[in-house]
Amino acid sequence: MIEFHYCPTPNCWKIAIMLEEIGHPYDIRPYNIFQGDQLQPAFRKLNPNNKLPVIVDTEPLGEGAPITIFESGAILFYLAEKSGRFLARDVHERMATMEWLAWQIAGFGPMLGQASHFVRYAPEPHPYSIARYTNECRRLTHVLEYRLGQSAYLARDYSIADMAIWPWAKFLPLLDIDLAGFPNVRRWFAEIEARPAVERVFSNEKTAIDPSYVQAERRLTDEEWANTYGEKMLAAATMVPE
């Protein structure tokens, strides 16, 4: 069994999709990040960075004691290694998968996250930041379009790279980036959206989209701000778990 410490965000959806794809049993442990669930001392024992997702595999690869893994890319890699699926053994396809997984972790995800912050959560409009990050998101979507014009998927076959990128691409319209202008991305997006594993994730009330997450603009209360971007988040980084 895998304990899946979860909140409804793209980084967690990518793990939910992988777990559904490989058919591995898992138990959802839900967190409300706006209420600060991820800042509690018990969670910091699992992830010193106080971020989700985290998994705890009670029957790990290679047997032995349970293993705790944080960071979504590391989790995807672990699940691919454990299941023997969605990460090719052929070095060329394997490295293509790892390249595009790294691209998502280093660029596509963080840039969409920053753009979303300034467009949807910032207490006051900041035109320079909005332009900076939405322009970079549009540029990265063109990179994705170029790659998907060369290959049906990010590597030769459907892989953990696609699972990592797809949940972020789902929210490009919130940044006024219309997939109608990116036909290769639109084709790829629709194919993955139709996969049974993806449908199960978004039809399950435990992993479905929180309606508040897809609001074009979401103004946070002072308490929510403190837990996600402010003093409580900073204080958690100095906490030493007992």
Image (cartoon, helix red, strand yellow):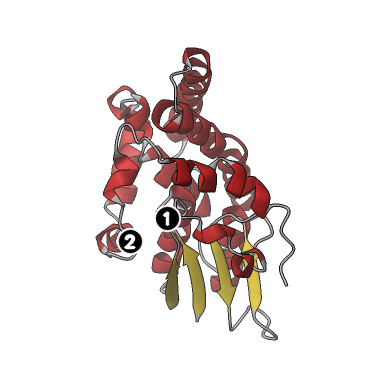
Badge 1 amino acid: Trp
Q: Which residue is drawn at 46% across and 38% down?
A: 151
Circles 2, 1 touching at the beta carbon (< 8 Å):
yes
Q: Which of marks 2 and 1 is nearer the N terminus?
A: 1
Q: Where is residue 191 in the image (x, y as percent from the top left)?
A: 30, 47
The residue positioned 61% from the left and 68% from the top of the image is 81
Indicate the quadrant containing the C terminus: top left, top right, bottom left or bottom right. Answer: bottom right
Q: Which residue corresponds to the image point at 56% horizontal and 36% vertical from the top-left?
A: 110
Amino acid on which disc 2 is placed: Val
Tag 2: Cα neighbours inside 10 Å, few (<14), some, or many (≥20)? many
- In the structure shown, which secondary structural element does the residue marked by tag 2 occupy? helix
Q: Nearer the viewer, residue 32 or 3?
A: 32
Residue 88, x across and y down, in percent: 57, 58
Left or right of 21 in this view: 60: right
- Identify residue for label 1: 13
State the separation of the CA atoms marked 2 and 1. 8 Å
How dense is the environment of label 1, judged by Cα within 10 Å: few (below 14), some, or many (20 and up)?
Answer: many
Residue 95, x across and y down, in percent: 65, 48
In the drawing, what numbered circle is on residue 201? Answer: 2
Which residue is situated farthest in the bottom direction here? 64
